[in-house]
């Protein structure tokens, strides 16, 4: 897989709400402003995937044309935060797979939908162990029961193809359901 080289002095994207550089290929965040999309392009991303609903907080009505006008590919997969589906995830995974050789910026309103989808994607595609991927997810939020269930269902349905997967990976609500230990149980 060949990914476009990073800009030698890329712009600082940390002003974008909940921005997280997951890898050289994938960056995630909450909703960028119109001006921040130019910085995203300047940082070397050439695909934008939006998982937010058009009615989400701070959504930009003209985001698709704005992104395309900057020379980036735009894909909108609206995911209902209270009811994520397997079809939503499969569409997302298909798009990321299709753009495997390109730098992709994925966002939603708060980087919560995105961080959960990226967690599952990385584990299923063998790009990270559960522990590695959990670190990035946890940096953004603690998945609520709806999202914890969604994550476990997707991992169970897709298997765990991660190389070097731990013999005792982080557990999702199997520790007894302590909200504070969606990952490794802190109460054991």
Image (cartoon, grey):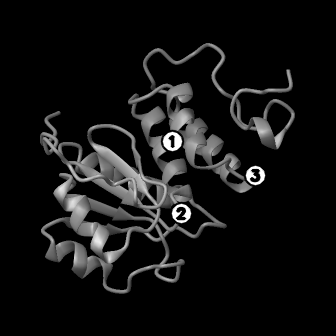
Disc 1 residue crowd, few under 14, some 14–19, many 20+, Cα 10 Å = many
Lateral position of residue 171 relative to residue 19, left or right: right
Mark 2 neighbour density, 10 Å: few (under 14) some (14–19) many (20 or more):
many
Choose the circle earlier in sequence order: 3 or 2: 2
Question: Which of pointers 1 and 3 lies earlier in the amino acid sequence?
Answer: 1
Q: Which-is-in-front pick, marks 2 and 1?
A: 2
Residue 3 image offset from top left, x and y in percent: 16, 39
- Which of discs 3 and 2 lies nearer the camera? The answer is 2
Instruction: Describe the element under mark 2 as helix, strand or loop.
Output: loop
Residue at x 38% of width, y 30% of height? 127
Name the mark on residue 145.
Answer: 3
Instruction: Identify the secondary structure beneath mark 1.
Output: helix
Q: Quadrant of the N terminus?
A: top left
Mark 2 / mark 1, whichever is N-terminal: 2
Q: Tell me the CA gap for discs 2 and 1.
A: 18 Å
| Residue 59 quadrant | bottom left
Task: Name the residue carrying label 2.
Answer: 110
Q: Which residue carries the number 1 mark?
A: 120
Find residue 46 and report its horizontal and vertical position in percent: 19, 57
Q: Position of residue 77 (x, y in %)?
A: 41, 67
Classify 10 Å Cα crowding around label 3: few (below 14), some (14-19), many (20 and above): some
**Does residue 59 sit above or below 84 in this rendering?**
below
Residues at marks 3 and 2, CA–CA distance in whole angstroms: 18 Å
Marks 3 and 2 in Cβ contact (< 8 Å): no
The picture places residue 33, in percent across and down from the top left corner, at: 37, 73
Instruction: Compare residues 48 and 156 and report the one nearer the observer.
Output: 48
Residue in the image at 66% along x and 16% along y: 168
């Amino acid at each position: 897989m060949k990914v476009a080289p990073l800009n030698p002095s890329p712009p600082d994207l940390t002003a974008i709400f909940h921005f997280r550089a997951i890898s050289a290929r994938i960056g995630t965040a909450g909703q960028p402003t119109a001006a921040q999309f130019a910085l995203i392009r300047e940082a070397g991303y050439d695909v934008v995937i939006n998982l937010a609903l058009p009615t989400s907080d701070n959504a930009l009505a003209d985001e698709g044309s704005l992104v395309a006008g900057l020379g980036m590919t735009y894909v909108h997969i609206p995911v209902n935060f209270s009811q994520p589906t397997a079809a939503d995830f499969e569409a997302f995974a298909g798009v990321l797979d299709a753009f495997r050789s390109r730098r992709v910026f994925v966002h939603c309103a708060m980087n919560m939908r995105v961080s959960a989808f990226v967690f599952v994607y990385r584990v299923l595609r063998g790009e990270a162990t559960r522990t590695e991927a959990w670190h990035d997810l946890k940096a953004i939020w603690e998945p609520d029961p709806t999202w914890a269930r969604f994550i476990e269902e997707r991992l169970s349905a897709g298997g765990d193809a991660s190389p070097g997967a731990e013999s005792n990976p982080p557990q999702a609500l199997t520790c007894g359901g302590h909200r504070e230990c969606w990952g490794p149980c802190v109460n054991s």
